[in-house]
Amino acid sequence: MSIALSSGATPARERPPLGTTGPVGWLRANLFGSWWSTALTLALGYVVVRFLWGFIDWALIRAVWTVPMGPHGPDATICRQMKGAGACWAVIGDKWRFILFGQYPYNEQWRPGICVALFIALYAASANRAFWRRELLYLWLGTLAVIFALMWGGFGPLQFVPDDQWGGLPITLILATFGLVAAFPLAILVALGRRSKELPVVRILCVVYVELIRGVPLISLLFMASVLFPLFMPEGLNPDKLLRAQVAIILFAGAYLAEVVRAGLQALPKGQSEAAEALGLSYWRKTRLIILPQALRLVIPPLVNTFIGFFKDTSLVLIIGIYDLLTAGKVALADPAWTGFAAEVYLVLAAIYFMFCFAMSRYSHGLELRLAAARGR
Amino acid sequence: MSHAAGDPRLIGAQQAPRKPWRLSWSDPRTRNVVWQVVVIGAVGAVLWYLIGNTNRNLAARHIATGFGFLGRTAGIPIGEQPIPYNSATDTFAKALLEGILNTLKVAVVGIILATIWGTLIGIGRTSRNWLVARLTAIYVETLRDIPVLLQLLFWYTLLQGLPAPRQAMRLGSIFLSNRGIKIPVLVWSGAYSWAVLGGVLGIGLTVVWARWAKRRRDETGSAPPVWPVALGLIIGLPVLIWALLGAPHVVDAPALHGFNFVGGATITPEYAALLLGLSIYTAAYIAEIVRSGIQSVPHGQWEAAGALGLRRGTVLRMVVLPQALRVIIPPMTSQYLNLTKNSSLAVAIGYQDIVSIANTTLNQTGQAIEGIAIIMAVYLVISLSISLFMNWYNARMALVER
Amino acid sequence: MDETPAILLEQVNKWYGSMHVLRDVSLSVAQGERVVVCGPSGSGKSTMIRCINRLEEHQQGRIVVDGTELTDDLRALDAIRREVGMVFQSFNLFPHLTILENCTLAPIQVRKMKRVEAEELAMEYLRRVRIPEQAKKYPGQLSGGQQQRVAIARALCMRPKIMLFDEPTSALDPEMIKEVLDTMVGLAETGMTMVCVTHEMGFARQVANRVVFMDRGEIVESGEPNALFENPQTDRLRLFLSQILRGH
């Protein structure tokens, strides 16, 4: 801001006192408003600069990006010399395929790669409100079918890959997405059951299911899946580990989603239900044509937030030994060449999880604002 | 609704004759009964099938059901013992009790830490200082978008990466090494028990004093001081008792002896990582709850109270907090429950909570159903207790309004 | 008669960022005087009245209330806020307290009154605004007009020397405006010093000693209400009056 120029244009009295506008004014108002604010700014600023500089020094300046190959695989000696001072990103360079795709046959890893891309495309398509139609459901079912076909293979030139060899990011995406899709119908039924006044037995069953599942940690359900499900099945039938974990996640997701759907049903004005009844619609028609389409629209933002939760929670399958993204990262660290470089691997894993969750949470936040604005109009 | 009984429109309705129940598909009551019978039948059939399979499988594997194993000697070594435990002689029941206590130890301390830290971050989110507001926003957004298990593993790795005991980082008599945090403790003596008793007495007296002070203010207008008296009673009284009993102070400080420490108390790396990870993660959620609670109180409330001449602290205490807390408490409850349930991730970093010990138990005994039932029962009881307490507290807060 | 003015504004200037919202505002309100401030929205009238008890800070000039100058000194601010009552457009009652508790909070906490006395005082003022029977209810159970009358009683319970009204009837349904205005007329008759931002011209004619017309952050005209309304000197006031009259 040029003072000479503006004082020529307006008389002195018309100008705000110096230092209340422009960058100086901004600094005063937002960083140095009072002595307490100033002290906070200086102290925090110091800590942030120190921390950022230390991190940049470790992660970029003194980092080791590649290591030479030794007779028994990569030779991490340089990394060990720099340990504590500089990051060893060479571990990522060596292990990234394993972290992303686990034990999937190396030459076939383009298949899970395409699957990850399909998942991301599916999410992106669903985020677009222009696509919120019945066809979206078919798109989801179709894409999931393609994904499973690609992962398993066993037709044409695609070699069959049993699902105990799947791993990494696709497993995380499958567990979360398929969990959501399969839990959704269950959740709708349970939410409707919990609200039915005429069927007390059904209501009690739904309440017990929801509260029981929400009262215990996911881990106990996963343990149940890995230890108890084999006992529940008739002899000879032994569903594999991944399917068992998926069932546990569906049961878990069903209870949480049911509560989200129930909130949507509750938020719907009673007049909608009454108007539908006055038109002579039966319960199921009323629910399917009038109530659910509106209620589900209402709950999309909390639904996305719940999905973010599932996405993160799938990492718990580590504890029952399923090869998701986190497990693959942990197993990569078990390689004797790379023991001790956990921080680097964990940071990369965190970045991957963060990218997915952050994108979804920004989206849900923006959607919430838009839907609120649309309702306000 | 109590006033509904007196509503003249409802008196007639309540006395209306009930229609006779016809056994016809067009009578909704028939439909309701049939539907429920069908649902019960289906659920029952599935359960019957599963239980039948389970019984056959158990028989085939020669596993007897029942909780008889609880009385057998466990032989599970437990590193973290809230009460003395001997793996050679103590039973599975005792081992599981250790696990429950370890879970509670993490949950209770974690809830306290997460609440304090989360509240600070949440207040920071509403700060007028740009840097504070930005940093706390980044904190919340980042930590909420990374799985808590990954965070736990990360903290555990960092703590394990600390130097060995011989090169431990030292802060006075506190040692930080890969064996955990060693802190000096006072050797317990009778004087401390009396001092603790004095402290409890002090809290009781403070409550009495505060009530008296409030009544006196209501009656005369001049309020007797509460904080100095409370400080004196709660802190001064125990110190006085301790001093009168000869002020014993034998400090058991940790010292390096060979390759490890002797003396002092230990916070194990497992416990520290779990506590740190859970508190830091849950604090991000609590911060958002606190922020929305504070922002739910309109700015006009501050202005109106200020225009009446109330000081900032009084406004916060008498006007803003009571309103914000009503928004804060319900979601806070579910965060406390989440933290407690997430403490089960202990098993991933080798802290022996109830899940970890029950898991070992079921691996050793083969009593899978019982082991998982115990885990679930423990968490259900904890969840139920927290919800009951919070519902009671919430009802009390709501009563203040109407 | 005390000669020091109840409120004195000298060359007060205020900016929001680079927007000049108060321009050289000077105003003197004598003890017992009733001043109505009017003007189009965004003219700075609310900002001016909020500067008087420092809900907003002015950046240049002097504001003296009851002989005490408004500065950064918190004790002076406490003293002034004790003597100046304020009624807001949106009532701002405390929703978690009963009507009676709303009225006794400040007398007990600030004036250090006994609870019994504070309650007697509150009941007296609630009778004066004609809603003593609502004392045990909560604000949410009252109509807008009743809430605003409670807000007036709440301010009066501090026994202020000066009352500020910031568009007290703007948020009310038409049928409730009268009950609030009647309360304010009653208050004016007790000789209270009042500064009132309002568009109610009938009220201005009935009780105001003086009407101040503000536009774009400055005082354009001021004078005795009838003279001002019948014979506006500036185009800006004429335009404003024609808009107000068309609106009613």
Image (cartoon, coloured by chain):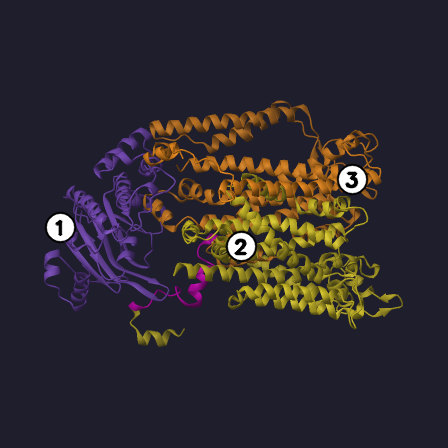
**Circle 3 — which element?**
helix
Q: Chain of mark 2?
A: A
| Residue holding disc 1 | C206
Residues shaded magenta: A13-36
| Label drawn at residue A68 | none
| Label drawn at residue B362 | 3
| Residue holding disc 2 | A302
User: How packed is label 1: few (under 14 Cα within 10 Å), some, or many (20 or more)?
Assistant: few
Q: Give, as a three-letter code, the residue at label 1.
A: Gln
Labels in figure, total: 3
**Comparing labels 3 and 1, the label whose residue is closer to the camera:** 3
> Whole-percent x and y of residue B256?
79, 42
* Residue contact between numbered discs 2 and 3, judged by CB atoms under 8 Å: no
Measured in 3D between alpha carbons, the distance from the residue under mark 2 to the one under mark 3, in whole angstroms, is 38 Å
> Whole-percent x and y of residue B13?
37, 35
Both marks 1 and 2 on one chain: no
- Image colour for chain A is yellow
Say whether residue C197 is visible: yes
Query: Of residues C31 and A204, which is closer to you in this image?
Result: A204
In this picture, is B131 found above or below B96?
below
Q: Is residue C181 left or right of residue A352?
A: left
Specify the quadrant of the image occupied by residue A376: bottom left
Specify the quadrant of the image occupied by residue C216: bottom left
Please say whether residue A15 is one of the residues in the magenta stretch. Answer: yes
Most extreme residue toward the right is A71
* Residue contact between numbered discs 1 and 2, judged by CB atoms under 8 Å: no
Q: Residue at horizontal 64%, vertical 47%?
A: B278
Q: Give, as a three-letter code, the residue at label 2.
A: Pro
Q: Is residue B239 left or right of residue C95?
A: right
Measured in 3D between alpha carbons, the distance from the residue under mark 1 to the one under mark 2, in whole angstroms, is 56 Å
Q: Is residue B84 left or right of residue C230?
A: right
